[in-house]
Amino acid sequence: MASWVSASVFLVVLAARNTVGQDVPRGIGDWKIEYGNLRARVLVVEKTDAVRAHISWRRRDDLPETKGLIVVDATTDKPISNVARVAINREFSDIVFEPTSGPGVYLVYYLPFKQTGPTYFPVVTYAPSKDEANPEWVARLALKTDAWKSLPEARLMQIQARGEWNRPDPMEVIATDAETAQLRDDHPNESCLVFPEDRTHSIRMDRDLPERWIERGPSDSFAADACRNEFLSFQLGLWAPRKPLENITISFRDLVNGGGGRLPAASLRCINQAGTDWLGRKFSKSIVVPKGGIAPLWLGLQVPAKAEPGTYRGSLTINAKGLPAKQFRLEIQVKPQVLADSGDSDPANMSRLRWLDSTIGLDDEVVAPYTPLQVKGSVVECLGRKVRFGTDGFPSSISSGGNEILSRPISLIAETGGIDLDWKSAPTKTIAVAKGAITRQTGTAASSLSMTCVSKMESDGYINFRVAVTAKKAVRMDDIRLEVPVRREMATFLMGMGRKGGMRPSQWAWDWKKGYSNNSVWIGAVDGGLQCKLKGQEESWDLFRLTSIPDAWSNGGHGGCTITEVGKDTVLLRAYSGARQLKAGQTLYFNFGLLVTPVKPLDSAHWSQRYDHEFISPEKAKQNGATIINIHQGNDLNPNINYPFLQADKMAAYVKQAHALGMKVKIYYTVRELSSRLPEIWALRSLGYEVFTDGPGGGDSWLQEHLVSHYSPAWHTPLADGSVDAAIATVGLSRWHNYYLEGLGWLIKNVGIDGLYLDGIGYDREIMKRVRKVMDRARPGCLIDFHCGNSFRPEYGMNSCANEFMEHFPYINSLWFGEGYGYNESPDYWLTEISGIPFGLYGEMLEGNGNPWRGMVYGMTARYYSGADPKPIWTLWDSFGIAQSKMLGYWSAACPVHTDNPDVLATAYVRDGKTLIALASWAKTPVQVKLNVDWKALGLDPSHMSMTAPEVKGFQPAASFIVDDPIPVEPGKGWMILMSRTP
């Protein structure tokens, strides 16, 4: 393909071809993806060696002259090699090509690309410009001169996109430079031109005017129809033709009708100007438009349900720094129809944008299984746990299940000159009290420092501390550190701060690393423990990497944490900050959180919650023995990741079928990345980086051609129809979480889902509390099961999932830790990292379908997924009646069965008159073990009982055993042995 043009030729072509309002038909077609997403259909009407084609494509991408272009003969479906590029720019192209089949249709593909890399994270590379035309053909036609202008012209029939999804028109078809300049000149005294749009034409570009705006022109009014109780969304596109627009604000006035009826100003909002964050805090935003730039502002009007039908007129005022106020007229025709849901039944209505400011579930009420806090002076009790607060505001005693966890009070120690400062405390004040939380504040002072400790203890056993330390005068500190002394007998295990779960070492050291978000640690036993998380001044949720390291704790690299044995009774967690110089009045925030474990009793409903994780019919799932179906993303019912609203009708029909069979249906729906298919994507992009993260761009071709830049590509899912659901990353905490919560409530009420399957959690515990409240209030009995791959790897921050997400565990029903977990690890790893038992949760296995023998020691099976078949084990559970049994694991002093081999562990499921013993071996070779049984605890007489292993397909053959005889156990395997009373 040849490419050349002199400056003079280019200018002549540009002047001749850039005509305002040129009508170019646009439509869609279907072709192979390698050619790209856009093409022009041109018609050759006569037989000739060469034709010229002028294509007014008006494309928004930069440097089109550097990108590839393919001309295909529609008759043969073969590319043409003899193609010369005369002029290529963003506005148009002039090309010459050889019509190899004579008269007929020829296809000019622009933006061809090649896709490589992993399916879920593809790399799309656009083909570069190439000169492939035969030099003899070029010379014969004298194409390096103006001779090309005399060639026959191929007629532009239509510009097409590969399917409706890839269409750039009308909002991404750019105005030409000449048109833009003319528009600016037509309004010589205007520094801000306004282009209103309804909700059906989302403003997509921030530097190019759409051709549509040239045709329609700016306006000072907007009119629309709306139903009663409808949330009507619309847009104002602000263009700054001459200079930047700064400090833009929008103010509203009442809309009134002829009869005196009003749509109050308070019913209008601009989501770009103000909102409510995920904690319910009101905030405002600064709106700025750079010179030549465009700012899309999304506005909404909540029409009162009782508004009188008729025409309402009013106005809004646009103010910007240094400019006169601009009045903008509104006219709304309110129709008699009342929308019960404000328009939410169709996402395209954009009525759900009001969800961004929702406070649904934002309160301190109690959710099951928790009970209202009991407060008696300085002692606060929650479900199974008790905390006594000292005079300094920190816990002096913490107990779980009657087990004292602390060996002495927790304290914040300030050391200067080798001496610990002596804090003097003022009386503690109670700031707020609710059934589910109590907030207290304590002020303390020392010679050179003052400290304010605000604690909030909640009904789930979480205590958040906001600790502000202020220097009264300039002072040199040796250290400011938090000390958490745990009783050694309650410090059996340790997990976190760079150490995977298991037996606690005698000492451990950790320091801050920006790449790692492992700034929390759990120390405890099965019947009581404590997680401590060190926090910054502002709340954040960093999954794998800290976006910022808290300066108070880290102190420029001098801070860290040690966990050491002190004396005979204490394991001391010491979070230190190191030496520093403080200025008079300087304040440091040593915020941290504590969670007392286990967070709740183990739920016996686990034994009947049996999952099918494959996308199959409810009837088939029922046959498999499942009682719950998880619908993952990326299938016909839930194709769009974290936006499960576009196929809601299909999903509702599926859920209805499952409910008729007595089954529950849960869906994949979280926050971390978001499908680009959501109708609100352009409204969210208009918020800057409030919802979507900034990033380098890339990923799927649609993202690159439409979002263009300033985004982070995330999970991509190929769909059954050959399209791709391409997601982009969202920020850790934002208003989108409010939308997410409203969406969850909508799905429960309108689709009938029974809860969530969370694959990773893209939000903190504050959102998780709201999730649980939304579910329980919409339909009690909803479930959350949580899946995560092993994140104890450098690229994921060296943080075990059980530790990282522990603060969410009070509101989760079950765990499914999977990819990357080692089922050949030691029992203490199984207990702390996989089982969930020390935290009050049951789990299930995934990686390689797990180890069923070891799993049963912890009450775990696999799910119906990836070839696993847990139905035979479920059948044994039912025949035994495991839901009515009491589980006594090997870790419990009350476990009535042990083996004589420390590498073979036993868990007893005890019922009246019978007990199921789960044996599992961690021995490296076959062994013979004998059981040591507390017959009295089992209520069995060894002389009147049978001991059998029922046949369980894929697990064990049928077998009988005699008391006191050795039992053969293969490495990595085990038995389920039923002990039953006989006459």
Image (spheres, helix red, strand yellow):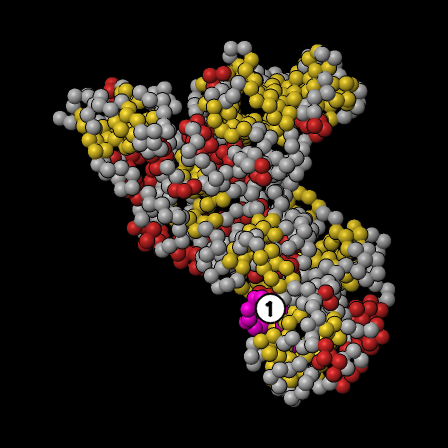
Q: Residue at x 54, y 57 (%)?
A: 725
* Residue at the outermost front position: 136
Residue 292 placement, left or right of 677: right
Q: Residues within 10 Å of mark 1 (few under 14, many from 20)?
A: many
Residue 525 placement, left or right of 590: left
Q: Tell me which segment is drawn in magenta.
A: 25-40
Q: Quadrant of the C terminus?
A: top left
Closer to us: 193 or 519: 519
Residue 82: image location, x then y, percent:
67, 77
Residue 980: image location, x then y, percent:
20, 28
- Secondary structure of the residue carrying tag 1 is helix
Count of residue discs: 1
Q: Is residue 483 above or below residue 356?
A: above
Instruction: Say if residue 210 shows up in the picture.
Output: no
Q: Residue at x 31, y 20 (%)?
A: 900
Give the image quarter of residue 765. top right
Mark 1, residue position = 35
Residue 383: image location, x then y, percent:
45, 27
Residue 432: image location, x then y, percent:
59, 29
Q: Is residue 861 above or below residue 454?
A: below
Q: Amino acid at mark 1?
A: Tyr
Is 745 magenta? The answer is no
Is 28 magenta? The answer is yes
